[in-house]
């Protein structure tokens, strides 16, 4: 309905599609702007998350809790940036159906009315029903109606919704599909034939080029220097896949869809540049404030630690009698887990050094999961097969060593828990309950 309304105002199919893209961009702008702001804020937090990962290495549970706490403090929803990135693709598929089926989707004619138009054109000898079902039959019917509008006055009178639409734009018929083999099948002797066909052929090419630059601008305005290398590789592959998809869709769909994709890519680039400039200024202020808050928090923690150490040295510390037994147990458990995680990491590093295995982050690690891609994963096993066998052996040895250390510390934790349970007297339990 919106596309038809724009056509009735402009009486130009191509201009109507471009205005349609602009209006949709303004409708979705508040949501996409919010999504971009959230993604940019998450990118700014990457250095802090890497510090947390390093600080809590070997204790993924504590790391996840700290990351969740950081997101809560910064009022960030990690999933808020995903949904609106899919909207342009959804609109693209919906628009393709409207362009492909103008009679039933754009003009909202019934199936009986479309059949009446078909019968009328067949009776006048203006149209022949194809032997095979054609997905673009309604475009052909709409073109016939436009070319013979003066002979179909009775149809326009009986069907008020039937509109005479011309799909001509810059000498091209946007209802036609570009021919991928145009360069060696064109009749170069007739300018009025090959020139419009050349324009149609260039539409998918231009849409692919603009799609590439649109993604390049998006990546340039979102710093990737702190992103995981595997994620960077994935984003770079997407930067090439999306333009290829754009070109493919441009050749299999009517040219009107390619015009929309071109307009959408141009608008996306303009939007990225403007929003990036606006939000970078806001995030710079936020970063400065965050650094001050974190620095003040660290200073306060250090002050309390020093004060506690001073009181402990004077034997002047005392336990808060109002602290519940459950809180004491939880705090003690957290301290024990942190201590054991640090000891386990140190033991792994010591044994790896003895075995000549690197302590660097393994290729298989994703976030805090050290073997997410497989326990013997080597990133260059195909590009560097000469060294892959040795690297794979070392990766497997590292995995086996880590499992052995984890098993030893699990047994150590179990024995410590059993000793603690045996050494807890009924009188001490009663005293704990009272406190």
Image (cartoon, grey):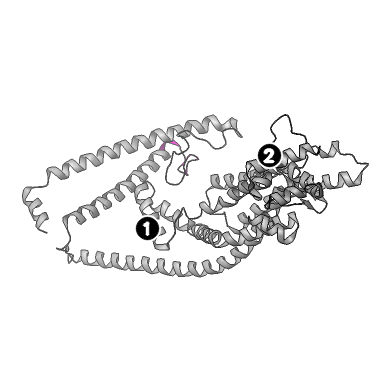
What residue sits 39% from the left and 53% below the top?
Answer: 55
Q: Is residue 382 left or right of residue 402?
A: right
Is residue 295 at all visible to an observer of this figure? yes
Residue 379, position in %: x, y? 54, 38
Residue 2, position in %: x, y? 64, 57
Q: Which mark is first along the chain, 2 or 1?
A: 1
Is residue 248 at all visible to an observer of this figure? no
Location of residue 433 (image quadrant): bottom left
Residue 221, position in %: x, y? 61, 59
Q: Residues within 10 Å of mark 2 (few under 14, many from 20)?
A: few
| Magenta stretch: dominant secondary structure | loop
Q: Image height check: is 248 above or below 2?
A: above
Position of the N terminus, as image quadrant, is: bottom right
Provide the residue designation for mark 2: 115
Q: Within the magenta stretch, is there residue 384?
A: no
The secondary element bearing badge 1 is classed as helix
Residue 69's label in the rendered image is 1
Q: Image height check: is 238 above or below 286?
A: above
Position of the C terminus, as image quadrant, is: bottom left
Residue 334, position in %: x, y? 27, 52
Q: Which residues are magenta?
A: 354-364
Q: Is residue 129 left or right of residue 407?
A: right
Label 1, label 2: how many angstroms apart (C-alpha)? Answer: 62 Å
Of 408 and 315, the residue lying toward us: 408
Q: Within the magenta stretch, is there residue 358?
A: yes
């Amino acid at each position: 309905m919106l596309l038809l309304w724009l056509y009735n105002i402009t009486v130009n199919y191509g201009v109507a599609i471009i205005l349609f893209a602009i209006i949709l961009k303004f409708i979705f702008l508040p949501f996409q702007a919010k999504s971009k702001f959230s993604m940019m804020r998450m990118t700014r937090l990457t250095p802090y998350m890497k510090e947390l990962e390093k600080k809590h290495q070997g204790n993924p549970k504590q790391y996840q809790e700290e990351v969740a706490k950081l997101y809560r403090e910064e009022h960030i929803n990690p999933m808020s940036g995903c949904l609106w990135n899919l909207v342009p693709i959804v609109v693209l598929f919906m628009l393709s159906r409207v362009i492909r089926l103008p009679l039933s989707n754009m003009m909202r004619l019934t199936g009986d009315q479309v059949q009446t138009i078909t019968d009328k054109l067949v009776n006048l000898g203006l149209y022949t029903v194809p032997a095979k079902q054609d997905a673009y039959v309604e475009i052909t019917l709409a073109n016939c109606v436009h070319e013979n509008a003066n002979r179909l006055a009775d149809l326009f009178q009986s069907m008020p919704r039937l509109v005479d639409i011309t799909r001509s734009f810059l000498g091209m018929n946007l209802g036609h599909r570009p021919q991928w083999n145009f360069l060696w099948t064109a009749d170069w002797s007739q300018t009025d034939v090959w020139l419009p066909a050349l324009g149609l052929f260039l539409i998918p090419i231009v849409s692919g080029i603009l799609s590439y630059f649109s993604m390049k601008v998006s990546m340039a305005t979102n710093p990737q220097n702190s992103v995981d290398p595997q994620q960077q590789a994935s984003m770079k592959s997407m930067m090439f896949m999306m333009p290829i998809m754009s070109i493919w869709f441009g050749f299999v769909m009517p040219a009107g869809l390619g015009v929309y994709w071109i307009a959408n890519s141009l608008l996306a680039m303009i939007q990225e540049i403007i929003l990036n400039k606006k939000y970078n200024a806001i995030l710079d202020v936020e970063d400065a404030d965050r650094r001050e808050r974190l620095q003040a928090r660290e200073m306060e923690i250090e002050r309390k630690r020093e004060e506690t150490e001073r009181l402990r040295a004077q034997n002047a510390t005392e336990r808060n009698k109002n602290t519940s037994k459950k809180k004491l147990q939880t705090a003690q458990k957290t301290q024990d887990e942190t201590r054991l995680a640090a000891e386990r990491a140190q033991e792994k590093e010591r044994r790896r050094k003895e075995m000549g295995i690197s302590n660097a982050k393994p290729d298989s690690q994703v976030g805090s999961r050290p073997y997410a891609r497989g326990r013997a994963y080597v990133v260059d096993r195909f590009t560097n097969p000469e060294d892959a066998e040795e690297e794979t052996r070392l990766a497997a040895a590292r995995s086996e060593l880590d499992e052995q250390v984890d098993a030893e510390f699990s047994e150590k934790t179990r024995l410590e828990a059993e000793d603690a349970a045996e050494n807890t007297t009924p009188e001490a339990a009663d005293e704990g309950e009272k406190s």
